[in-house]
Image (spheres, helix red, strand yellow):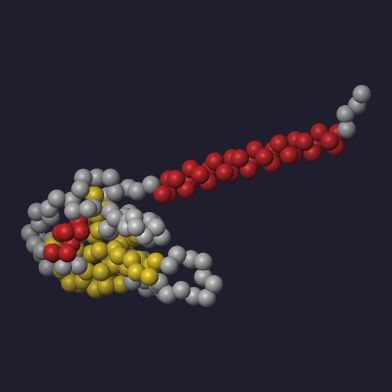
Amino acid sequence: MRSNPGQCGRAFLVVRHHSVTVLFLILSLLVATGCASNRATGPYFEEPLSVISDKASVYFYRAPVIEQLSDTPRWTSRAYVQYDRIGELDPGGYFVHYLQPGRYRISDASNDNYGAQTIWLTVEAGRSYFIKADYRVRQQFFLSQSSRWATYLKSVDVVEALEELKQCRLM
């Protein structure tokens, strides 16, 4: 009995198609779980580090996710000084960056295109400054399916920052 070569070819293509689909699903799952992991796993903030006499200490932080609000952003926020990326912040994370005295562009984007949130910060040697990655409700556009939250950076006074930093871990 002869088998139909057309039938064998189709069966091979079906098996191959399913293998590619399964492989794609596995890779997608690995990427999604990798992106969802929080890298703020260092020690909790206790107190500001000792200052360096000829530089300013700038603490960048992001408060933990508000669990009661299920749609609060869980993505990574980026921080730029001038136009150079200096770090990323996951919810509940912080890091310290040291700057020479002067005036700096602090932003969540590498350029000044639409959507970049920029603040200007003048720093002095031997002092500490605090920048918080926060979020607010974004204006919804008709039929928009995008997240309703937008992140932005803001300068925070020492009292507020030290209280909020207690909930944050080093990135």
Residue 21 sits above or below residue 166 on the image: above
Q: Quadrant of residue 9?
A: top right
Q: Residue 103: x percent and y percent?
A: 20, 72
Q: Quadrant of residue 163?
A: bottom left
Q: Residue at x 18, y 53 (%)?
A: 166
Whether residue 146 sits left or right of residue 134 in the image: it is right
Q: Residue at x 30, y 65 (%)?
A: 134
Q: Residue 62: x percent and y percent?
A: 28, 59
Q: Quadrant of residue 67?
A: bottom left
Whether residue 81 sits left or right of residue 144 in the image: it is left
Image quadrant in which the N terminus is located: top right
Q: Residue at x 65, y 38 (%)?
A: 19
Q: Residue 28: x percent and y percent?
A: 53, 46
The residue at the far right in this view is 1
Whether residue 53 sits left or right of residue 57 in the image: it is left
Q: Nearer the viewer, residue 147 or 84?
A: 147
Disc tally is 0
The residue at the far top in this view is 1
The residue at the far front in this view is 68
Q: Nearer the viewer, residue 99 or 3?
A: 3
Residue 101 visible in the picture: no
Whether residue 113 sits left or right of residue 83 in the image: it is right
Residue 78 visible in the picture: yes
Q: Residue 157: x percent and y percent?
A: 16, 68
